[in-house]
Amino acid sequence: MIRTDKLVFEYIRRDEEGNVEGITRAVDEVDLSVEPGQFIAILGHNGSGKSTLAKHFNALLYPTEGEVYVDGMNTDDGEHLWEIRQEAGMIFQNPDNQIIGQVVEEDVGFGPENMGVPTEEIWERVDESLKAVRMDKFRKSSPNHLSGGQKQRVSIAGVIAMHPKCIIMDEPTAMLDPNGRREVIRAARALNQVEGITIILITHYMEEVVDADKVFVMDKGRIVMEGTPREVFSRVDKLKELRLGVPQVTLLAHELAKSGLPIHEPVLTRAELVKELKALKER
Amino acid sequence: MAILLNHVNYIYDEDTAMAHPALIDVSLNIPDGQFIGLIGHTGSGKSTLIQHMNGLVKPTSGQVLFDGEDINEKGYDKKALRAKVGLVFQYPEHQLFETDCFKDVCFGPKNQGLPKKEAELRAYEALKQVGFDDEYFYQSPFDLSGGQKRRVAIAGVLAMRPQVLILDEPTAGLDPKGREDILGLISRLHKETGITIILVSHSMEDVADYVQRIIVMNSGRVQFDGEPRQVFAHYRELEEIGLAAPQVTYVMKELKEAGFDVDENATTLEEAKNEILRVFK
Amino acid sequence: MLRDITLGQYYRTESVIHKLDPRVKLVATFAFIVSLFLVKNFIGYVIAFLFLALCVKLSNVPPRFIFRGMKAIFFLLILTMVFNLFLTPGDPLVTVWKFKITKEGIRLAFMMGIRLVFLITGSSLMTLTTTPNNLTDGLESLLKPLKKVHVPVHEISMMMSIALRFIPILMEETDKIMKAQMARGADFESGSLMTRARSLVPLLVPLFISAFRRANDLAMAMESRCYRGGEGRTKMKPLIYQSHDYIAYIAILAYLVLIVVFGRILFV
């Protein structure tokens, strides 16, 4: 679905007079590939380059070196620009700054309008998209009266209405409270499982990636770890070094193991930890 | 007895069709030197509550007392109050405006009417308290990373030398290490200076490790108020109002149900670890 | 304080007027305003009043909402009337110190007052019964002919609707920044004009930065959703005239004819 080949992105820093101060490599030789239908998570601390990377998947940024392919199309190839943006939809961090319409349903219709979809079909798409994120009850509401989680779901509906194959979510939960975070993650998972849409979730909340098919961890523009959540979470100390954490149970299990209890790491859920401890007790 | 709220009610958008109660009969006692976690989901009234404590919002009925005096009485010096009860808003870095960090931190003490020397001294101290590096003092605040900006913004309030420091979601939007750093910083401030701290959060896990007391707000009312272990004992009710106890609380409950002889009220990672290790000894 | 300014004071209810195409309402409002300046006699005002009253009745908007808009111009209304009352030359009726009240003055003050009240009522009725985005859609469609002379009609209406979407957000933000600076001892309310102007810096700088950040984010979000200007764009809610819209046009025309005939030509 998405493939990058030695992707490098550099930007030039300038001082107040416009003189070049230096060059920052925000993304550094990233090779990654995402298969259709996967649920992928990209982790990294603030400033690790994960958002810059994400913007390449939607042709909002273009590589300085290397290549990005979305569904076989090179993003550098201007001819496919609109196809790429339609196929790989994007959700951003700030719920307020990505809603254009003054009424929920009109915002959801914004993408299809831009694509030139006939009026009747826009209505069909808006209906089904709002249902998919369970926001159909709010279709006539003003976005200003919604909670953060609801606003993000409206944004997701706006992307689904464009019938994408893949949705890239750039820290969609960073500004939400726990309720809102749950709503958004639940919606993302449902889209992945029910509609088969590829999801790329960028986040630093570890709890959100436990169910991902694959996790990439970024630092200083590079991918420094990749694997299943189980593989990644088994390296608690390495993650801490990268300014990240692990879910509290994983950490508890890790601490117990360090204190000498023979626990099989990593432990990702509460049930797993209780099971482990029970097994230990019976021995 | 520093802050006392006496049957405070607040109606939002009074006199309009949108009127709705934001605070309902809130009575609280915030003694000097406590480290308090104030928890509630968005719209629970916690932000409105803290704005009552430094007089930014006036209660519709009821009183707010600071050191025994009603702050909404005519002639009460609110400006002086706001220096004593420092309030750090959510995303405080969005309020930075000066050309360099140091000047920005001086803004508060200058408004207090302090002489320039004294204001600068306090600003310097505050920046040191938040662990801000000297080399960035004269940089534009807009060139800093998110975590650094937030430190400058917190220093901006600390520089007024408040007796009570209220922080609204100070970790919002930061990465895990950034969150840990800021929380560590706040906890250190409490230990070193002994000032009262009210930490507003919606993350129980963040709060449980540090605070002595938790106040849970729900639909404008104080739902629970007590030590963390007392509050988390109500984990089922907390779930119902959209909040959850820390993961370890659940682990301990489940272990207890599975027949382990552990204290099910452990709320921090450290406590949980020690309890489990004790059982296996 | 800032929250009191309400733009787009749409009153949600069901009515014939609400259902009308925004273009009809825009044209009607324009026609009504023009008619007020055509009227030359008392009969004309009666006709205008009856037309307006009928529209208000049909709109199901409680009159107190309509008169709320009047509060804002009350001062202007009084001022206009006083000026006209005292400063119109003609036969003096009463003399108060140096000022004369003339017959013509009374007549003119009365006419201006009525005009202003009708004008505000008429345009309030339009904004009360039309959602702001419907209004921009209507304007875009009515101004379409200007595209031929290279007026960027689509862009202007897009800008208007984005502004309408973000004004409440920026209001809230202003309130928040103000409070945050007040928590740091800022004072926005006292001092001389100069100090007060200077005290706005801590409010305006963060507000501008935030507005630019939002604009940047929004541009990115729009681009990522395939926005590329008005070219080749379809509409989710295209404006299509229904039969009641044609009836409304006929009613407006009839009203204009009545005004011209009775308010201007006959009984001069």
Image (cartoon, rainbow, N blue to C red):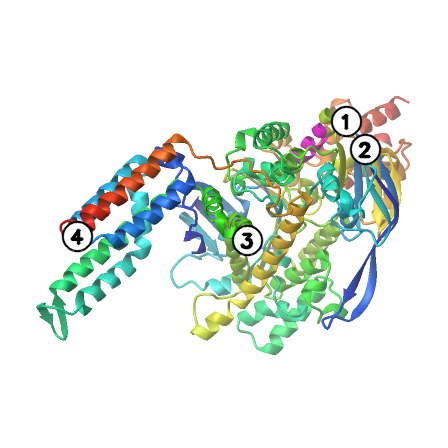
Instruction: Give the CA distance from mark 1 to mark 4.
Output: 90 Å
To which chain does the residue with label 3 belong?
Answer: C
Residue placed under numbered mark 3 in the picture: C152
- Is the same chain shared between marks 1 and 4? no
Residue at position x 28%, y 36% from top? C57
For residue C245, above or below residue B113: above
To which chain does the residue with label 2 belong?
Answer: B
Three-letter amino acid code of the residue under disc 4: Asn
Q: Secondary structure at mark 4?
A: loop
Instruction: Give the CA distance from mark 2 to mark 1.
Output: 9 Å
Percent across and percent down for residue A47 are 78, 53
Residue placed under numbered mark 2 in the picture: B276
Q: Nearer the viewer, mark 3 or mark 1?
A: 3
Binning the other alpha carbons within 10 Å of mark 4 as few (below 14), some (14 to 19) or many (20 upward) gives: some
Residue placed under numbered mark 4 in the picture: C41
Q: Which residues are magenta?
A: A183-191
Quick one: label 2 or label 1, which is nearer the N terminus?
A: 1
